Image (spheres, coloured by chain):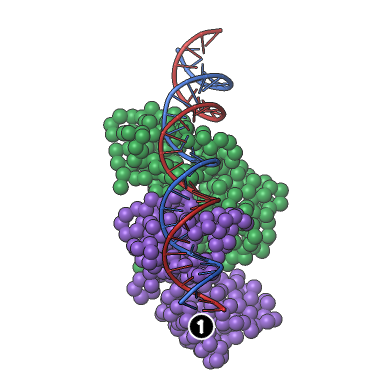
Chain colours: A purple, B green, C red, D blue
Amino acid sequence: MTTAVGGRGRAYPDLVNAHVLVVEDDATVRDVVARYLGDAGHRVELAGDGPSGLEAAVRGEPDVVVLDLMLPGLSGLEVCRALRARRTNAAIVMLTALGEEDDRVLGLELGADDYVTKPFSPRELVLRVGSVLRRTAPVDGPDAPLVDGDLRVEPAARRAFLGAVELALTTREFDLLAFLLARPGRAFTRAELLAQVWGWDFGDHSTVTVHVRRLREKIEADPTQPRRIATIWGTGYRYDGAA
Amino acid sequence: MTTAVGGRGRAYPDLVNAHVLVVEDDATVRDVVARYLGDAGHRVELAGDGPSGLEAAVRGEPDVVVLDLMLPGLSGLEVCRALRARRTNAAIVMLTALGEEDDRVLGLELGADDYVTKPFSPRELVLRVGSVLRRTAPVDGPDAPLVDGDLRVEPAARRAFLGAVELALTTREFDLLAFLLARPGRAFTRAELLAQVWGWDFGDHSTVTVHVRRLREKIEADPTQPRRIATIWGTGYRYDGAA
DNA sequence: GGCCGTCGTCACCGTTCGGTAAGGCGGCCT
DNA sequence: AGGCCGCCTTACCGAACGGTGACGACGGCC
């Protein structure tokens, strides 16, 4: 999917800056959704009815279409069917009202990828869009390469590179880096890291500390001034992108 | 399958008309999936339970098996194990429910190539099938010669050459080399190799170690400094091309 | 029936890895 | 400004891992 829109067809590990088309007739809902999606880092396009939504979807080749079911001119289901008939690659997230169960099932059969039931929180919609992007991302599978700036981690090969040189990471270091890099911008406590990376439910938190330090020594230009793995005082660590 | 809309893009290489076997007990899911895969250009075969799925997989030699984990008669994991034990070279995509994390990991170790978490959209599954085909299907036939530098393996003839001289490889050594050489740059655990090359899901990991060692003795200029089959500490092995 | 080749297992050894402990530093709060 | 707590840093040691050589079982072939 995602025939590269515009310039770079980002293989989004970061899952931002996707092109999202919102087709919704209620202007208030539309604007709120647009703002939230925009804040989440996506490029947003808007349409207020079925025909113009379809037109925009075909022309703009968005990554995701957020599609209201009840639309003037052309129902969401019809837009959905039309998009799939044209072999559009965009993922589709439907907005359904309570009690539209039948339409929801029909929508999924017609090729929608997910749905959100009204009334919904904008935040939930953003999450769904992110989830759909992740699931249908062009480079997918359990082993998609993780890239951040000049740092590149290849889970399938179990290799990591900083620029052109390969890093000599130990098993733990590699797993830790891959874990953090796959979830940039999110903070983890040491206990969470022990649980997720080590698979332990108990254990000395300093273990994490030491491993983070060893990692920093290998991936940070200046380990005393870490730019990638940030310390969150009193909490834990967070991977900050090159941004 | 969704051959590149409008020329460029090529979301997928033209891996259409693959033979896909769907093993799933829920008739509704099965039919929807079948229709989508069919629309995507694949030849679809269906099975509703474990035993008949296994039978169909062995008889029909599909390119991809889409395998539900929860099956009547024989679980997806057991089917997976049986397929690998028979050295089937079909790719396997598991359908797992949320919360079946353990089974998923086990499945990947047993030789599954990818998984999709329920609930999933049919479109997503089609993407995964395409992705798996791209990753696993050798561009040429399964019997195409495998070449890396001055090393040449001919699966059809079951012969291997280093430069001009033919190597005297045993059956296991040949299978192991052919397997790795067909998937250069990808890391495998010993368990995965046991599953994929030996067709076991138990057994001593040192078996792999020893065979790798024997192989190295025949294909590496200096077995103590292997350049082709790299050791990944704490993990397994990886074939590194001459590049 | 004997011989040879292959394969799986095992024990040994050198190396690497990873968790822990201890001391010093620096930020945070009062 | 001072004290305290949390983080960084270093060193160390036990455990785990992979490489190596050897052995014995099995099966095919002469």
C25 left or right of B27?
A: left
Camera-nearest residue between B172 and B98: B98
Q: Residue at x 48, y 56 (%)?
A: A210
Q: Relative to residue A243, is residue B65 drawn left or right? A: right
User: Residue A222, percent across and down?
Assistant: 35, 63
Question: At numbered mark 1, what does the secondary structure look like: helix, strand or loop?
Answer: helix
Q: Mark 1 — on which chain does it sit?
A: A
Residue type at mark 1: give it: Tyr
- Residue drawn 57% across and 46% down? B110
Q: Residue furthest right?
A: B73
In the image as oriented, which residue stretches furthest toward the bottom? A27
Which residue corresponds to the image point at 66% horizontal and 64% vertical from the top-left?
Answer: B28
Q: Quadrant of residue B204?
A: top right
Residue at 68% x, 82% y is A98
Whether residue A175 is situated above or below residue B156 in the rendered picture: below
Pointer 1 residue? A36
Q: Is residue B107 above or below residue B10?
A: above
Whether residue A227 can be seen here: yes
Q: Nearer the viewer, residue A216 or B24?
A: A216
- Residue A30, given in percent of the width and then of the height, sits at 53, 88
| Near-viewer residue (B188 or B7) | B188
- The answer to whether any part of residue A137 appears in the image is no
Residue C12 is situated, as x and y percent measured from the top left of the image, at 49, 27
From what the image shows, is residue A136 above or below residue A51? above
Pointer 1 local density, CA inside 10 Å: few below 14, some 14–19, many at least 20: some
